Image (spheres, coloured by chain):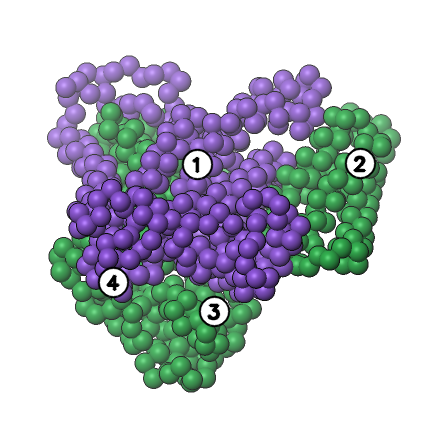
Amino acid sequence: MVTQDTRSAAAGTRPEGTGTGAPDADRKVRIVRVSPEGAATLGGAAASALALVWVLYERVLPFTGVLGFWLCWYVAFLLLYAVMARMQWDRRDVANKVMAVALATGGALVLAVVLGTDLYTLVRGAAAVVHANFWVQSMAFAGPTSGLGIGGAAHAAVGTLEQIAIGTMLSVPLAVATAVFLSEVGGALARPVRIIVEAMTALPDIIAGLFIYALFILTFGEQKSGLAAGLAIAVTMLPIIARASEVVLRLVPGTLREASYALGSSQWRTVWNVVLPTARPGLATAIVLGMARGIGETAPVLIVAGYTKEFNFDPLSGPMVSLPLYIWNFVHIEGVNPQYVARGFGAGVVLVLVVLGLFTLARKLGGTAPGELTKRQRRQLARQGARV
Amino acid sequence: MAVALTPTPPSPVNDDRPRAIAAAPVLSDRVFRLAMRAAGLAVLAITGLILVFLVLRSLTAFRAVGFGFFTTATWFINTNQFGIAAILPLGILIALIALIIAVPVGLASALFISEYAPARLRRALIALVDLMAAIPSIIVALFGLYFLMPKIIGTDAWLAHHLGFIPVFHFLLPNSPGSFVGSTFIAGVVVSVLVIPVITSLSRQVFSQAPQGEREAAYALGSTKWGMVRTVVIPYGRAGMIGASMLGLGRALGETIAVSFILTPLYVFNTHVLESGGNSVTYMIANFVLQEGPKGISALFAAGLVLFALTLGINTIAAIIINRSRSGASASAD
């Protein structure tokens, strides 16, 4: 039996499978399967489109560009696939198959983009990160002409850590409280708050920086500092965490709350002892994902953090560079120097690894839905049950 | 005030509405609710404060040029000839190009994930889209500048030569690779990478909530999978698709880093998207806030205010549409 995979979806559904013999009553009938004709049509269309486009694009017409080649190939592939399918099946079936392939392309593109951006950064940044000094030194003693054996991004990593710590400490309590308000307290105020939270998740990041610049630097007369950057990051993280947390809190079964009320507890006790603990894995995921977003923020810190080549451990005074800002400076501001670009990509590697690490952590933390037990917990319960 | 002890709607399960219990909440509950309400108000207050501060700081610029700020297409601070008539439309152009790419790709991947992918692949793809949303925009900007841009330039030349008769693809600059660098089109393509996850994750949530009964009814009437998707899932998710695309537009308008990396600055409006040069409000703010005098900074605040009002408006409408299409009971966490 052919296992169900992406190609099965791409090859389309065949209500009556071209199965081997009559299915006996006990066996589960698989509805989706790859039929030989389906797979052959798909592969044939892909191959003939490749051949056709290669001849036209590379030999006959004066076209250039890798991207254009694959775009043309894709269009030719879909057309040929539709024609070849039409020769065998009826219209509805053809529409079904062609759309399945077209939609699967969307999924494949998402995969390609994620892999492409991350792998490209890792490969280009390898030159800088293989030097041990990159992980422990600042740029204080490295000039424009010094090789990758001198200087590093450690000062930016320190800045990133401190800024994300400030951002998390400020935004998480407020965000979770807002989520609790939206899902547990409610009332007439909940609707506008929910809509503003959702609207703020897609607000321009740079506006957060501009706001902190106006408030903190122009109005309070403070200097550019790590604290200002942390504040700006907090403003951008707040709606992201609030929205994700609210979704998680809503998944807590109402029966749990009612059981708590029936035992005579107050709403405060119910939220604190029942709702929040039940939603803990989901909340942890929401917070870690928010941190992953906050760490990569460049625009908000751009105009409030300042720039320095040296270590600055004090967020309250003096400019403090972070990893994204380090990349911004070395690639955007001074982008003609290949040494600097290499350093920028090196910092990109660190950033990608941190985001991937946080993301994996979030998945680990939030692997279970509220009330759902892990395998280990289930085994434990079964053992206890057997003993009783 | 008689307050229900049980949560008022929207609560997780509101099929059978709990009867109101007329009991005065205890002190701890009153404090708790007050605190939570204050948190909700704080979010509104932050948004309000952003608006207030942007307005306050932009007064200098508005006093200097008045309404001309919206009609001037140049940016000369010292002679009081500055405005966003060129910059804002150029930024909108980038956002539109990003949407032309991101909407079909985002909706296709959302449909694939919610309808076509087998269960195990679905979980992986959902995680992947989350990951895509978490990729820092500066990483996408690096990828766009060093990997995508050289590749797109070839396609640009192709488009300019063979589709040049279409007005937006007109190309009037000399034909050398340099004239294609840093164009609005390339910026739009790179920004689309950042918009796709926004559209995919929101519309996927809406698609996956299409009612099971109607799906099965479509199959029972002999529909193919695509027939079912076309007649049940897409009509059901239409509002969500529109809302997600609008939120994507808001995201695209606000993108700063990718745009700044790619663009070669330009201060005149130009609809020829393949030609080198482009601009956006975010580009202006990111690149010049450190260099100009008080009036220049005020002008940037004014531009930021316009951008803020624009995106807040778009996003709010989008959020209202999405909230209307999504019943609270079935919101999913992943």
Question: Which residue in the structure is indicated by mark 3?
Answer: A345
| Residue A274 drawn at (x, y percent) | 31, 35
> Label 2 belongs to which residue?
A83
Give the residue type at disc 3: Phe
The location of residue B315, given as percent across then percent down, is 37, 37
What chain is the purple one? B
Tell me the quarter of the image containing the N terminus of chain B. Answer: top left
> Distance between the Cα atoms at labels 1 and 4?
34 Å
Image coordinates of residue B65 in percent, x first then y, are 22, 48
Chain at tag 1: B
Residues tagged by mark 1 and mark 4 found on one chain of the structure: yes
Contact (Cβ within 8 Å) of mark 3 with mark 1 = no
- CA separation, marks 3 and 4? 30 Å
Residue on which the image places disc 4:
B292
User: Which image quadrant is residue B324 in?
Assistant: top left
Residue underneath mark 1 = B246
| Marks 2 and 4, how far apart at CA | 61 Å
Front-lying residue, B295 or B55: B295
Mark 3 vs mark 1: give the one in front: 1
**SS class of the residue under badge 4?**
loop
Question: For chain A, what colour was chosen?
Answer: green
Are there few (<14), some (14-19), or many (20+) residues within 10 Å of tag 4? some
Q: Earlier in the sequence, mark 2 or mark 3?
A: 2
